[in-house]
Image (cartoon, helix red, strand yellow):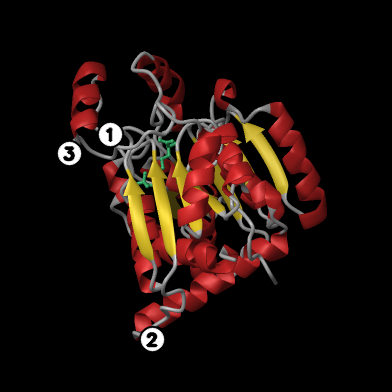
Amino acid sequence: MDLRGRSFLTLKDFTPQEIVYLIDLAAEYKDKKKKGIPHDTLRGKNIALIFEKTSTRTRCSFEVAAHDLGMGTTYLDPSGSQIGKKESIADTARVLGRMFEGIEYRGFEQAIVEELAKYAGVPVWNGLTNEYHPTQMLADMLTIREHFGHLEGIKLTYMGDARYNMGNSLMIACAKLGMHFTACTSKDYFPNAALVAECEEYAKQSGATITLTEDVDTGTKNADVIYTDVWVSMGEPEEVWAERIEKLSPYKVTKAVMENAGKQSIFLHCLPAFHDLKTKIGKEQGEKYHFTELEVTDEVFESNQSLVFDEAENRMHTIKAVIAATLK
Ligand code: CP
Ligand code: NVA
């Protein structure tokens, strides 16, 4: 398998074999890290990390992964560079491509990261756009595989806003890897029809299935993985909160949902999560809309079925695999 020189923008661009290769490589790096075996094979190389939206996991994963591999990193924060204000993406790409061996980008439209990759001349990695979050997928798939021992045939139900980066990316990942994907949400939040059609094509090859349902009982019955994400994503306006709470409240992950899924089920969330009021935004919105927990109850989040911190750790191991596999 040779992925050198490839950008990592969406899993749509990768075959199931290539995706599994990256998960396998991540598992190898995880093992090395746990055993204290050095793997700083990329000494002398440098990567740029562009963040037009905030981050804890993705930024730290890229930085720790790069340092473990012996590389240098430069972080460009949401306000501290010329990007998008005084300098176009195409010009930025050509400048950074002369200095760095790879570029991570987190921001708004997918078209921006595609443009960056077109002009950079070095691999570009999507650290989250409005449409996709592909590095998160590798971490999620590694976590699921570690727990169940396999991916094919696993039933994953996504509850919440299924037409944004997480819902889209999970549907693609499941369709490519032979898993059964269900979006269980209000029909206003179903993934868009064109992407569903594309995923149906992947599913024909892999044996996956795709189900869209508004019914919580059937949508979560016997699911192996119950997955959710925040109801309001980064960059969305304040006005959407009221509608999201109204439409998505029936799709909160509760103990009843986990019991309906069954004892074998696990809970995943890309994080950060509003499972209590211990955050500034959670507290403000909670007071305004009278809730104490949003997309998932604190009970489920803190339960033994919740593997969210294994999942968060796996961001680092999988991002390390992406960097190492794609650098020229
Ligand atoms: N899951 C995720 O991408 O987290 P951050 O926003 O903290 O990077
Ligand atoms: N849908 C969320 C994912 C955060 C990792 C967002 O875009 O804010």
Nearest the eye: 221 or 288: 288
Measured as percent of width and height from the top left, residue 297 is found at 31, 40
The quadrant of the picture showing ligand 2 is top left
Numbered badge on residue 293: 1
Residue 127 visible in this rendered orientation of the protein: no
Kindly state the secondary structure of the residue where label 2 is placed: loop
Q: Give the Cα distance between marks 3 and 2.
A: 38 Å
Nearer to us in this view, 326 or 246: 326
Q: Mark 1 Cα within 10 Å, few/some/many (few <14, many 20+)?
A: some
Residue occupying image coordinates x 33% and y 17%: 238
Marks 1,2: beta carbons within 8 A: no
The residue carrying mark 2 is: 37
Tell me the crowding category of disc 2: few under 14, some 14 to 19, or many 20 or more residues within 10 angstroms, Cα based: few
Helix, strand or loop at label 3? It is loop
The image quadrant that residue 63 belongs to is: bottom left
| First in sequence: mark 1 vs mark 2 | 2
Tell me what residue is drawn at x 40 percent, y 50 percent: 49
Q: Amino acid at mark 3?
A: Lys
- CA gap between label 3 and label 1 equals 10 Å
Is residue 172 placed above or below 213 in the rendered structure? Answer: below
Q: Is mark 3 within 8 Å of ligand 1?
A: no
Looking at the image, is mark 1 or mark 2 nearer the viewer?
2
On the rendered structure, is 262 left or right of 310?
right
Of the residues under marks 3 and 2, which one precedes in the sequence? 2
Q: Is residue 284 above or below residue 230?
A: above
Residue 320 shows up from this direction: yes
User: On the image, numbered disc 3 is attached to which residue?
Assistant: 278
For the residue labelled by badge 1, is the local secondary structure a helix, a strand or a loop? loop
**Where on the picture, by quarter, is residue 177?**
bottom right
The amino acid type, in three-letter code, at marker 2 is: Ile
Q: Quadrant of the C terminus?
A: bottom right
